[in-house]
């Protein structure tokens, strides 16, 4: 879970009044947070967030905002969301970035006092959002600049590595984009995010002065913020427009909470204009009867409106339906049960009367889980390294990179990011993604995962079914079908499961080197050598052979 540090006095200033240390555990629960430590000498306070679905709370400004609304019942007013930018406050996006890093948002923070507290929190917020939410800058990256040195409007363009030079942050010498990726520590760390594309993204001002090379590094001339600055420009770039706008909103609200005047920007995409920050207006409703059923007691409509309003929502009642519009810095409320949870947090879980369970059952490990443990033990014994990954994944991994046409899948409604937009129907794409990020590790590579996948099945309850799969992958210069078959054969021998292979075709595998795995006259999986085009799309430069089987089908 994310843990942030802040100055106690800074939290109190943003909150609006003094906070006794003994009160912290209770009031922090309103922000889904826990008090961890307080250094009385330095005044540093450590707070752990017990939930990861609200990036707006990963900063002292967000926690203070939540406490003001939930404890002091003071609504935050962000009038800049209805402001119209001038023609000077504009970012023009070049069409050549469409398939690279296409989205950007930005704003000006005017009349702000840049001091030690603000700088410390700004750096921490950047890190938390870019690493945790932004998947280590792949999804979003953030840049902050001394706006007094910038000539607006701005231009967001793509350049070849040798086409443009500037001095990156921390360096005095001019470097082209390729040299930055090779010599600068941040360039070396994040080169994998841009090296796979023909052009590198660059932000420049009206006079063609470079602001930054996102998501890698700011410029030394314009990208350095120091104490005493009074006007900042903040930008967010990324691969998802919704994620870019959400992070822009969070940062703008944070600056506003510190007294800054926020000036939104136009962003121009091929003639289309988008204003950032922008209120995303997420509307979710909950029936009063559903909320009462979930919480186990009768609740008045007035209480529901009061408590949900204290969590930042704009709330209205329509008969027995409660309709909520989320604040612009939140994008986590996608189901009525989310409103039930926020109501319970706002009212305090301790205010509910506890009930003892009326029925008792004895727990036990399911036979399928025990079988899975046996399979994992056997794979480890054959020298394979186990990975455990998220059940959520993206369509590009499952279909585009695997050379497969999109077919029945279970998708996430109101998805926050394309990277986690569907429930995985297979483990193999995830293993290939892992392999693509470990190309510098000594070969051979032998990895596997045993875990849940979700199959689209209209005849099943809720239109899907969850099964356990096993997928294994071998990669080295002389890897082939015979080798991966030997591991499958050893696994089936020790499980005492007879099987056979039959010729088949699959676009993810090389023709003639792929087979379907048959057990008890049923197809239970696939085995073969991965197609070179698939390897290229994942950025893998070694032969890969793999198999995947459904463990549920191995049990009679």
Image (cartoon, rainbow, N blue to C red):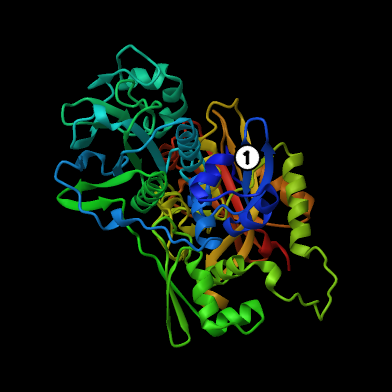
Residue that appears at 63% across and 41% down: 46
Residue 13 in picture, x, y percent from top left? 51, 45
> In the picture provided, is 430 more to the left or to the right than 531?
right
Quarter of the image where one finds residue 379:
top right
Give whichever of 514, 325 is nearer the camera: 325
> In the picture provided, is 113 more to the left or to the right than 123?
left
Residue that appears at 51% across and 80% down: 302
Classify 118 as above or below 176.
Answer: below
Badge 1 crowding class, 10 Å Cα cut-off, few under 14, some 14 to 19, many 20 or more, is some
- Residue 417 in sight: yes
**SS state under label 1:** strand
Residue 58 in picture, x, y percent from top left? 52, 46
Classify 387 as above or below 524.
Answer: above
Give whichever of 61, 237 is nearer the camera: 61
Residue that appears at 63% across and 63% down: 467
Quadrant of the image containing the C terminus:
bottom right
- Residue 457 in sight: no
Q: Name the residue under label 1.
A: 45
């Amino acid at each position: 879970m994310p843990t942030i540090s802040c100055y106690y006095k800074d939290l109190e200033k943003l909150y609006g009044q003094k906070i006794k240390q003994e009160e912290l555990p209770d009031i922090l629960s309103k922000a889904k947070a826990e008090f961890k430590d307080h250094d009385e000498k330095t005044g540093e306070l450590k707070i752990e967030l017990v939930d990861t679905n609200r990036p707006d709370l990963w900063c002292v400004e967000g926690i203070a905002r939540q406490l003001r609304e939930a404890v002091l019942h003071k609504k935050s007013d962000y009038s800049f969301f209805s402001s119209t930018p001038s023609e000077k406050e504009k970012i023009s996006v070049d069409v050549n970035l469409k398939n690279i890093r296409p989205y950007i948002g930005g704003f000006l923070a005017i009349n702000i006092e840049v001091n030690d507290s603000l700088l410390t929190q700004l750096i921490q917020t950047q890190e938390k959002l870019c690493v945790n939410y932004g998947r280590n800058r792949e999804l979003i990256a953030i840049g902050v600049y001394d706006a007094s040195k910038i000539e607006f409007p701005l231009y967001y363009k793509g350049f070849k590595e040798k086409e443009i030079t500037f001095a990156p942050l921390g360096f005095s010498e001019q470097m082209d984009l390729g040299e930055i990726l090779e010599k600068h520590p941040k360039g070396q760390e994040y080169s994998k995010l841009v090296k796979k594309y023909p052009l590198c993204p660059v932000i420049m001002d009206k006079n063609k002065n470079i602001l930054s090379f996102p998501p890698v590094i700011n410029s030394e001339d314009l990208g350095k913020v120091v104490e005493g600055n009074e006007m900042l420009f903040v930008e967010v770039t990324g691969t998802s427009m919704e994620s870019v706008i959400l992070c822009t909103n969070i940062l703008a609200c944070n600056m506003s909470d510190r007294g800054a005047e926020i000036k939104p920007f136009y962003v121009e995409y091929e003639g289309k204009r988008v204003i950032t920050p922008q209120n995303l207006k997420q509307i979710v409703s909950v029936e009063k009867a559903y909320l009462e059923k979930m919480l186990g007691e009768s609740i008045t409509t007035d209480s529901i409106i009061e408590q949900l309003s204290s969590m930042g929502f704009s709330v209205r009642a329509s008969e027995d339906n409660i309709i909520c519009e989320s604040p612009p810095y939140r994008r986590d409320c996608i189901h009525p049960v989310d409103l039930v949870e926020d109501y319970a947090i706002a009212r305090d879980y301790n205010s509910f009367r506890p009930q003892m369970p009326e029925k008792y059952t004895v727990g036990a490990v399911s036979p399928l889980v025990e079988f899975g443990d046996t399979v994992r033990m056997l794979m480890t014994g054959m020298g394979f390294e186990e990975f455990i990954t998220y059940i959520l994944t993206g369509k590009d991994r499952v279909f585009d990179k695997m050379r497969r046409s999109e077919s029945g899948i279970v998708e996430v409604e109101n998805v926050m990011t394309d990277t986690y937009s569907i429930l995985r129907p297979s483990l193999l794409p995830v293993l290939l993604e892992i392999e693509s990020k470990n190309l510098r590790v000594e070969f051979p590579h032998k990895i596997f995962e045993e875990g849940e996948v979700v199959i689209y099945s209209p005849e099943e309850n809720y239109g899907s079914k969850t099964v356990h799969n096993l997928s294994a992958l071998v990669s080295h210069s002389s890897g082939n079908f015979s080798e991966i078959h030997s591991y499958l054969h050893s696994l089936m021998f020790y499980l005492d499961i007879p099987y056979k292979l039959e010729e088949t075709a699959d676009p993810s595998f090389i023709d003639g080197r792929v087979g379907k795995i048959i057990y008890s006259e049923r197809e239970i999986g696939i085995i073969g050598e991965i197609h070179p085009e698939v390897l290229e799309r994942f950025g893998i430069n070694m032969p890969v052979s793999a198999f995947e089987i459904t463990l549920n089908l191995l049990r009679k």
